[in-house]
Amino acid sequence: MKQNLCILFASLAIFIFVSCNNNNTISETANSKTDTMNTTTEKKTKQGIKGAAGNLYIDDGGRGEKLPVVFLHSFAGSSRDWENQLNYLRKDRRAIAFDLRGHGRSDAPTNNDYNVESLANDLSAVVDSLGLDRFVLVGHSLGGSAAIAYAGRHPDKVAGLLVTGTPGKTPPQQSKPIIASLESEKYDTVMEQYMNKLLTNAKPGTDKLEREGLSKISKKASLKLIRAAFQYDPLPDLHKYPGPELIVSKSGEEPANSLHNSFPTIPFKTVDGTSHWIHLDRPAEFNKILKEFLERVEQR
């Protein structure tokens, strides 16, 4: 059961984006400007995009001629999960992170829709509203699943795809008993076991940030997120995406259904001594991996 929980909840890292349009963008920083050539904002901006699920909080900043990077956080996370990467990249390029719907400062969907396909459609609306013609996509856990779904549908826009802690397809024989346990009175216990497992080796700041995030997600929303993670099969969309790819995982976090095992030809890197949130626990090491990947993408 513990192994199955690991496999399941490695799927649980989610990012979600709301549908939106350019006319509904609300900026908190008046002195910023964006051009359509991806050279971007003069200052860091905080924006709310009005969409079908309500307002979506966006952290957008940096400038330069290099490819922009869009980050998708995990279940129970927020755009704050990527602060180290945003600060690192914004010295010479645009970097953007989002609070998923129902996370951070973004509204929860009234229809409780957290399907991966819906997330990919929302991402499409968001990047279009920000004028991003081509960019690198980085996703963590279920945020990685949403990134894969988007890349499979819009390969022309995704210059490179990096996913970290992102699972493959979970077999029904593994997912059904986990769903059943979460729907029972054992929900709190199961979720606590999940967080304890994923936060093993986490820095105190990582532990605090992710537990706070989880406390804000209702049981109803969590169950919907978990079902969405189980239902999505990333393999067909990965087959559709022909661009540069990279899979990053913590050591020992590769179950039998992992993306790496399904696609051994995709470059693969591991990081030792970290929790499920590599980019939070080992930011310097993750940033080095990210920099090397960006260099490979931009040399094409």
Image (tube, rainbow, N blue to C red):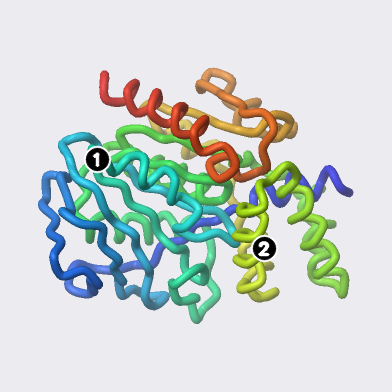
Image position of 118 (left or right of 253): left
**Which amino acid type is marked by label 1?**
Arg
What residue is pinned by disc 1? 93
Q: Position of residue 219 (x, y in %)?
A: 70, 74
How much space separates mark 2 and mark 1, taking CA atoms?
31 Å
Q: What residue is disc 2 on? A: 211
At a point 53% along the width and 61% down the height, the residue shown is 115
The local crowd at label 1, few if under 14, some if 14 to 19, many if 20 or more residues have their Cα within 10 Å, is: many
- State the residue at coordinates (39%, 23%): 292
N-terminal of the two: label 2 or label 1? 1
Query: x, y percentage for residue 183?
Result: 80, 71
220 relative position to 177: left or right: left
Residue 43 found in image quarter: bottom left
Q: Residue at x 38, y 61 (%)?
A: 122
Residue 30 visible in the snapshot:
yes
Asked if the residues shown at circle 2 and circle 1 are in contact, with their CB atoms under 8 angstroms apart, the answer is no
